[in-house]
Amino acid sequence: MGTRDYLANRTPVPVGTVTQLFFDSVDRFAERTAFRTIAGDDLEGITFEDITFGDVLVRVRDIGGGLAFLGLERGDRCAVLSENRFEWSQMDYGALCAGVPLVPIHTTLTPAQIGYILGDSGAKAVFVSTEEQLEKALEAIQSMAATPLVVVFDRLESLPDGVMAWHEFLEKGRLRAREIWDEEFRSVSLSGKPGDTATILYTSGTTGDPKGVVLAHNNLFSNATALTKVIPVDENDVTLSFLPLSHILQRMVDLCFFANGATIVYGRGVKTIPEDLKLSRPTKVVGAPRVFEKFFQAVMDQPGIKGLVVRWAREVGEAWAEETLAGRRPTWVLRVVYRLAHALLFRKMHDAMGGRLEFFVSGGAPLAPHINKFFFSAGILILEAYGLTETSPGITQTPPDNLQIGTVGPPIPGTEIRIAEDGEILVRGPQVMKEYFNRPEDTAAAFDEDEWFCTGDIGEINEKGHLCITDRKKNLLVTAGGKNIAPGPIENLVKENRFVDQVVMIGDQRHFPALLVVPDFPCLEGWARSAGLSVENRRDLLKRKEVQNHLGAEIFGLFGNLARYERPKKIGLIEEEFTIEGGILTPNQKVKRRVVRERYGSLIERFYDPASLNVDVFVEDE
């Protein structure tokens, strides 16, 4: 097999099980806080609930007994349908110790999707968080031949027949654990092998039915061990856990923190992330690019004098960042002006994040370089990582002392990376999955003839040994003229404009590429008012020719350095934000391009209608 690049990190990684990590942590850090939950609001008062590592050990033992009470045996599967909360993590460790692989389910899925995962995995029990999730689970299992048992975390006033309350499950488990284990719980839990299945995760997928990714204990053990060699974590660290635990990224992060005695804080939901950051005062946090984009937009959308100060501070910060990243010492004038920018803006950003943050890690999707550069100019590191569900997830990780914006870092210990002739990234290492559950043909297709895992991503290795991601292989557009276009870099270029919130490039098998754009409405509305335009609602705003001309000039003006065939020739303006709830984003914030093409098909067809030859900017349903 021909290749054009190869990179390896041959630092040895031990073999082991997640249960080894668990018992090591609860022994070493028994009195320290493992989990903290933030509850309440400004009106009712904020409260914190802490659970120690020692408490977790007791709870995990009860969960193991509860699973036995329900009739689950080693090798059976159970599912969790829940938001991030400490019951989720305790359920995870309880199932691992009992030898029962956990099947996470995203809370945004529909009953039909939930039913598919429960049926395909053969889960014998499902644990749900709230009444809303309970209703979806009950609807999902109505048509199933083998009905899973259902347990609900929240205390509800009444429960349907056949549904067990969490507190009852724990009490039954406590009694059952005494009967079957007595003092043997630890030895039974540690009897599992590194190759045993630890979890089955269903890829959210941008096309087709999800596949169950089977990860063994050693996949997770090796990945956690390797990642913490690059990103050290200790008992003084605190993290805010807000990416879905049903996705492997946050679950691996929480495992790394738990295994090293750190405190994991669960906030009140996605909408309160900014407040929860300040309340939890974390030291290290993992987020998705969309979180950083939202924060960037909130800072940049300041009106009036504040907006002028913010934009000035950004210019100063980026000039300072250019010099610093190039290894040059900024001039004394720039250093003085930068200190002023820090006092006026950047220090406030640090305070808003709790004041103790050492760095963010970004994963799950590509991070636009201008976002990373802005945070760096504010003195806030965002360390990009790269991985997949099938790789547990870590493949590469940017170290804190070697930031290279636009890359996702070098391979983590024990990992080899090869670039195939067509540019696809191939991976080999202990973190690579066992298989797709009950899909031998898909499993075989995921590996090449030399047993390298095919990631489906296109990339290259730079001269400093860092991996650069270009795009998903399946996202590449091939124009009617046969030209290949990677939409990701062009979309990131467009998102640098302050009037743009989200963008998707289309044009496969078309004569030219085009863009679907969700404007940054606070910024656009501010411009409209300054231009003397009335702003009654978003739909009417987008229909105004002055607005269309302004956005067209802003966006088309970005393409001067692109090859002619890469330049989008049409823009479609979208009123509604792309969201998980709306079905356009996956739970880890990736765009479902097929869904976009289907949902906005009529708008896209107008781009290529000969009657629209002289129209550059379109509005949805105009």
Image (spheres, rainbow, N blue to C red):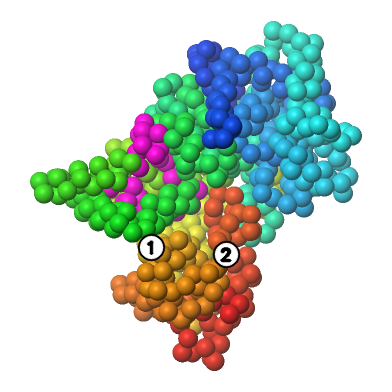
Q: Which mark is residue 498?
A: 1
Q: Element at badge 1?
A: loop
* Residue 230 in the figure: left or right of residue 248: left
Residue stretch rendered in magenta on the structure: 349-377
Inspect the magenta stretch and tell me whether residue 287 lies in it: no
Inspect the magenta stretch and tell me whether residue 364 lies in it: yes
Q: Element at badge 2?
A: loop
> What's the amino acid at mark 1?
Arg
Between 13 and 250, the residue placed more toward the observer is 250
* Residue 68 in the figure: left or right of residue 283: right
Between 113 and 295, the residue placed more toward the observer is 295
Circle 2 residue:
576
Q: Position of residue 71 (x, y in %)?
A: 83, 26
> What's the amino acid at mark 2?
Glu
Q: Position of residue 306 (x, y in %)?
A: 32, 54
Residues under labels 1 and 2: Cα distance? 17 Å
Q: Determine whether 448 is above or below 49 in the image.
A: below
Q: Residue at x 47, y 72 (%)?
A: 534
Between 284 and 190, the residue placed more toward the observer is 284
